[in-house]
Amino acid sequence: MSVNHLSNVRNYWSEIMGNKLIQETMSNKTCIRDTKKEEQIEEAMDHLVVLFGTEILSLIPGRVSTEVDARLSFNKEASIAKAIKYNKMYEKAGIPKERILIKLASTRESIQAAKVLEQEHGIHCNLTLLFSLYQGIVCAESDVTLIPPFVGRILDLHVANTNNKSFEPLKDPGVQLVTKIYNYFKKFNYKTVVMGASFRNIGEIKALAGCDLLTISPKLLEELELFNEPLTEYLTVKNGKASDLEKIEINEAKFRWEMNEGKMANDKLSEGIRNFAADSRKLEKILAEMLTEIK
């Protein structure tokens, strides 16, 4: 898939498909049945996110992430129930669970939910808003399928709160965190996939060459297309095995303490959950207004 095609797909979704799928959702009988309005809105939200995922999967190979409502980030059982519901809805649409990642925030409760989903239901999870090695380790020990440390957001925080306004790629704090997590996972044989995300420049991307996966915006892909020099593979299993990292034992008390001590992880996790929740409320408002019109 070319960079131009990726950009076209993005524009297609933002300008056309969003409205189309919302309209399709509101015509679904399960969303407008005779129940409380709050239940109708929740059903419409669930139907819509699965519709989006199904439509995207018709255009791409591989997997798509479907996010559990961020307002459930501290509710283990509700997160499990919602993920199982999404999985059943995808199965009904003919999508196998291997093509779905359930996206959860990297709170203690959501990681516990992911452990149950992975180990007992075979449902693959993507634990987002991850800003610390400790979050990564607990995810790996819980058999989480994938984690996407946010390189750019980590850089942004350091630029905003320190005297350093620029970093060489290999000294970029986001790059260093992803490298440390990757090396730790390889050294201690964890299977969780590390996917670097939220890049601010191609220097960060090149500094993470060899990472399991990278998610790269169309703009930065265009810049990479112009880069013709050989890449140095900085992240390798061999380098990870040879790293001097020591095994860290983490129980609930230590996890919560380290999150409390780690201002970046604590603040950015909370901020991300608030932002995701705000987006959910905006979508709920749109669906509520449409339900009122239907009635």
Image: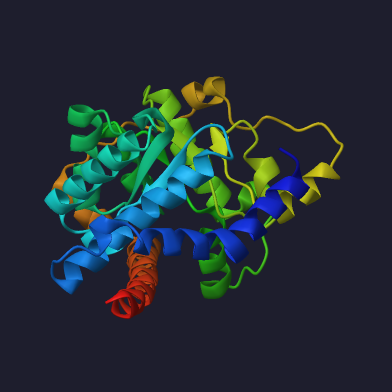
Residue nearest the viewer, comparing 181 with 116: 116
Q: Quadrant of residue 97?
A: top left
Residue nearest the viewer, comparing 228 with 13: 13
The percent coordinates of residue 253 (x first, y second) are 14, 51
Q: If the image is split into quadrants, where does the N terminus sit?
A: top right
Residue in the image at 44% along x and 32% along y: 193
Q: Quadrant of residue 165?
A: bottom right
Residue nearest the viewer, comparing 107 with 261: 107
The percent coordinates of residue 273 (x first, y second) are 33, 65
The percent coordinates of residue 10 (x first, y second) are 63, 55
The percent coordinates of residue 207 (x first, y second) are 66, 42
Does residue 185 sit above or below 4 in this rendering? above
Residue in the image at 57% along x and 25% along y: 236
- Left or right of 194 on screen, residue 44: left
Residue in the image at 65% along x and 51% along y: 9
Does residue 227 sit above or below 122 in this rendering? below
- Left or right of 62 on screen, residue 253: left
Q: Is residue 68 visible?
A: yes
Residue in the image at 37% along x and 33% along y: 145
Q: Is residue 124 visible?
A: no
